[in-house]
Amino acid sequence: MKYICLVAVLTISLTLIYGVAMAANDVEIVLEAELANEIKGPMVIAVPGDAKDAGGIAPDEPSNGKYVWAPGAPIAGGGGSGFVRFIIDIPEDDTYAIWARVVAWDGNSDSCWVTWEPADPKEDPQQTGNNDFRWSIGNGAVWHWDRIEAWLDNDAHIDREWELPKGETILTLWTREDATMIDSLYITNDIAGGLANARVPDDDDRKLQIQGGVGRAVEAAGKLSITWGSVKSLY
């Protein structure tokens, strides 16, 4: 049995407009890639030394010391099978975006397919080749944040946003090229502030991911943050 707990942060901020207190709800979901609900080979959990063993540059230390990838040498290309999948409980209806902490050595290790049901159809883009779900990743041999986008047929690049209902959703990152490394994900409905706020999971996040929890409340930067988690399992 494998467990994963997804962490969402509801930040409640009050803004006075014409003497009326208006509430704005910002949601954060911060995930370790290696704690996904399902990892299908050739995607595997790895450590920096695995990249060096494959003939490439070992990345700096990832969050929690691990990342996921489909092993491969630089400029090898490959891909075509395997995925990492998350079951995510969305706390409220809204529009969401994703930033991923990644390493992509070169132009042959810098893309994935991404689907997020139910906003996206139940489709395997490895089979259909639907470029609406193709994500072109910025190159770099050190961990960096890259927003998930759509790399379309006309070579246009459009930042992706997903209209999602409250409740259970399924996010899948499908292998397209070997050697693309994924460390962690930052998901939010605060799309304008997403990159500036992107962060890796801390010990409390990971504890909630693994064990679940009833939540915690903290004061930070003048905002009241309420965090809760839920446990999902696959057999």
Image: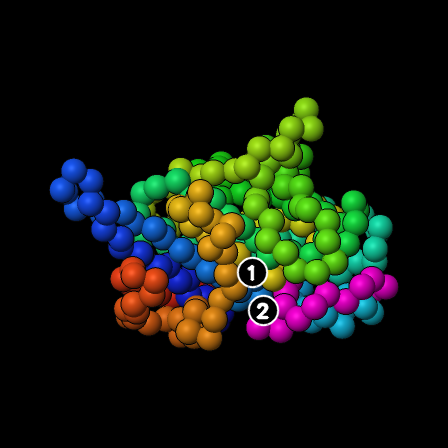
- At a point 77% along the width and 54% down the height, the residue shown is 105
- Name above or below for residue 49 compared with residue 36: below
Q: Residue furthest front?
A: 18
Q: Secondary structure at mark 1?
A: strand
Residue ranking furthest to the left: 19
Q: Is residue 12 left or right of residue 51?
A: left
Q: Is residue 79 magenta?
A: no
- Labels in figure, total: 2
Where are the magenta residues, as a range? 54-68
Residue 184 placed where, x, y %?
Answer: 56, 60
Q: Position of residue 191 (x, y in %)?
A: 44, 43
Outermost residue, top side:
154
Which residue lies under the disc numbered 2?
63
Front in this rendered view, residue 67 or 233: 67
Residue 218 falls left or right of residue 18 = right
Would residue 121 be visible to someone looking at this image?
yes
Q: Is residue 57 magenta?
A: yes
Residue 11: x and y, percent?
31, 56
Q: Residue at x 66, y 71 (%)?
A: 61
Task: Considering the whole magenta stretch, tell me its main secondary structure.
Answer: loop
Q: Are marks 1 and 2 in contact (CB under 8 Å)?
A: yes
Q: Looking at the image, which residue is at 20% across and 45% down?
A: 16
Instruction: Give the residue type that dot 1 points to.
Output: Ser
Could you say which is closer to the camera, residue 145 or residue 21?
21
Query: How far, Cα to Cα, is label 1 from label 2?
Result: 7 Å
- Residue located 49% across and 52% down the image: 196
Q: Is residue 78 left or right of residue 199?
A: right
- Amino acid type at circle 2 is Ser
Report x, y in % for residue 183. Answer: 60, 62
Tag 2 or tag 1, which sits nearer the N-term? Answer: 2
Residue that mark 1 sits on: 184
